[in-house]
Amino acid sequence: MIYPTDKTMNLFFTYTKEEIDKIGNTIIYLSEKIPLLSKTKALKLIYLIEETSVKKFGLPILNLKFFVWMYGPVTKDIFIDLSSNPILLNEYIKREERDGNSYISPNKAFSDDEFSDNEMAVIDLVIDTFKNYTAEQLVKLTHREHSLWYKTAKENNVLDLLENKQLNNTEIEIDFSRLLEGDDYKKEIYLQHREFLNVSRSLKL
């Protein structure tokens, strides 16, 4: 497991080397396929990859937790790591400044060793569908009415606060199982997978 140290003390969760490798290579792949990839665009695409994978197969690819933030859904540790020179993902990516803006670029070539064919198909689908969207357009897409972000924020009485920029972030987690209402088979796959992850991570703490 990767535990908080003097360099990673702000981590909210612990990660295995395999999990970090998969996250890092996903962002490498995004940055190779999408020129001038910003932090916000990368975070939105990572969310859409997870959402698409859960819808299609009942399983996420990266096993990240997402929370209802003003510009969310946001996965906390990756947001923090991409907000300055990466620490958690420094082996995989770096930030570059161009014309006053920050962009993500790879530190090494992409490796697909950790990915199945189905996972790569999902990632390619998300890239093909959304590569020409701006970061602002992707935020609006993930905030559209009936999206998980919108419904979760509304049900927890924070929607107006977030939309009016009176609240930046919350500890309210996005529940991907809600994407699978009406599909009991996929929903059971997802819930069993989450239970396995929670038990596995608790045993390694």
Image: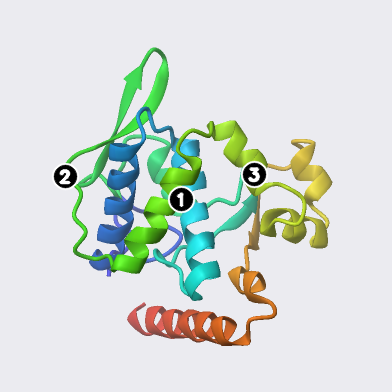
Q: Is residue 113 above or below residue 143?
A: below
Distance from disc 3 to disc 2, alpha carbons, whole Å, reads: 30 Å
Residue extending farthest to the left is 108
Q: Residue 73: where, in percent of width, then height?
A: 59, 51
* Amino acid at circle 2: Ala
| SS label for mark 2 | loop
Distance from disc 1 to disc 3, alpha carbons, whole Å, reads: 13 Å
- Residue wearing tag 2: 109
Q: Tell me which numbered mark, 1 or 3, is placed earlier along the sequence.
A: 1
Q: Residues within 10 Å of mark 1 (few under 14, many from 20)?
A: many
- Residue wearing tag 3: 141
Q: Which is in the foreground here, disc 1 or disc 3?
A: 1
Name the residue located 35 percent from the left edge and 43 percent from the top edge.
30
Q: Residues within 10 Å of mark 2 (few under 14, many from 20)?
A: few
Q: In the depicted view, which residue is nearer to us: 24 or 16?
A: 24
Distance from disc 1 to disc 2, alpha carbons, whole Å, reads: 20 Å
Q: Residue 184: where, in percent of width, then height?
A: 62, 86
* Amino acid at circle 1: Val
Q: Residues within 10 Å of mark 3 (few under 14, many from 20)?
A: some
Q: Is residue 141 above or below residue 58?
A: above
Q: Is residue 191 visible?
A: yes
Q: Tell me which numbered mark, 3 or 2, is placed earlier along the sequence.
A: 2
Q: In the depicted view, which residue is nearer to us: 131 or 31?
A: 131
Q: Identify the disc placed on residue 193.
A: none
